[in-house]
Image (cartoon, grey):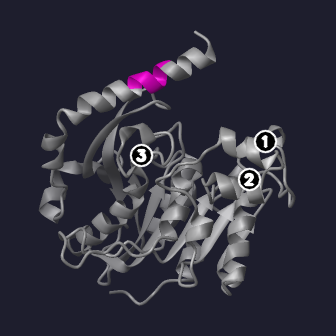
Amino acid sequence: MTMTGLTMWRGLRGALFAGLMSLVSVAWAQVTPPLSSQDMAPYWDPQCNCYRNVPWGGERWFETSLNREVSQVYDLWMPPMASETPMPLVIWAHASGSDHVIPNRKGPVYRGLVSPALAAGMAVMSVEFRHPVDNAYLGAVHHDDLLHVIQYARALAPALGLDVNNVFLASRSRGTLAIWTAMQDDRAQPDGSLQQQQSSRVTAVFGIQAQTTYASEENALYLYEEERKAYLKRNPGNPLFGSAVASASADDPPVLMRYTPAFYRRLVHRNELSAHHPDYGLTLCQRYTDLGIGEKCLAQDQVQQAQYFAGVIPFFQAFLKPAR
């Protein structure tokens, strides 16, 4: 099968799966995620020393990058020593080609993020979520998944001793939907459910290979040298969702972004890119500067994989707020 045929088949298969799931959407809407320590108990897995595959929502979908079905679940690690004060929470959003499961003590995410966080007295939640672009066929507000995760975590906080005042986002590639999420206005609904009443704002955000805008107009203006009309014709954009850059405001949280390639600091052609465009980070930091908060944004280039997580937990700790 050609690559074009394979892509068409995957899209068709995903659409068929979405159609089948719509038949049972009422049943899934009735799922109530665990919100107490007693509810959480059945999910404890001694092999990872964590809560495993806990549902935070009721959506399921076929994930083409994994060639299997996934659902809105998470794993949760807690610091080994009990604390009398609420624990800050780091939420990890993974890249495409992997899922929320972090190999215990083996992989770079566990060694670079989970282990240092636990040592610093922070809990870590690794979440499954829908891709902001690739899963658009599902027809839902899929790009809000991380917003809802933040609200869910705050609703869970009293049961597990988490600090609702200190929630951080860490992410890579696809997971840097977290950058867009951190730039959005608070989604708290005072008259909503327990989860909806919670704030969706975070204390700080970290991203590896972060895409700071999906808006075609901004890509054409800031990043790519292709003739503007041709670019916009091929990339009409997603009408539901777009830009962390345009969404940014003066009260947004500190952000740290790291990229493997060197910054271009000029418009480039797509053929020049072998990986994520590093100047996405510069574009967001320029927006922060324009807002008068440039000191809260840092974009770093030529960072090798072994150094992706170096200093991330201290970065979060520098912005800790009083526990609540």
Q: Nearer the viewer, residue 211 or 113?
A: 211
Q: Residues within 10 Å of mark 2 (few under 14, many from 20)?
A: some
| Residue that badge 2 annotates | 220
| Residue that badge 1 annotates | 270
What span is colored magenta in the figure? Answer: 9-13
Q: Residue 253 placed where, x, y %?
A: 54, 78
Q: Residue 129 placed where, x, y %?
A: 40, 48
Name the amino acid, label 1: Arg
Name the amino acid, label 2: Ala
Q: CA distance from mark 1 to mark 3?
A: 25 Å
| Circle nearer the viewer, 2 or 3 | 2
**Is residue 105 shown above or below 212?**
above
| Circle nearer the viewer, 2 or 1 | 2
Do the numbered discs 2 and 1 sit on residues whose CB atoms are within 8 Å?
Answer: no
| Residue for point 83% across, 58% down | 263
View extreme (front): residue: 229
| Residue that badge 3 annotates | 130
- Residue 140 in the figure: left or right of residue 277: left
Q: CA distance from mark 2 to mark 3?
A: 26 Å
| Residue for point 32% across, 84% down | 85
Mark nearer the N terminus (2 vs 1): 2
Q: Residue 28 placed where, x, y %?
A: 18, 43
Q: Is residue 10 magenta?
A: yes
| Residue for point 72% across, 56% down | 259
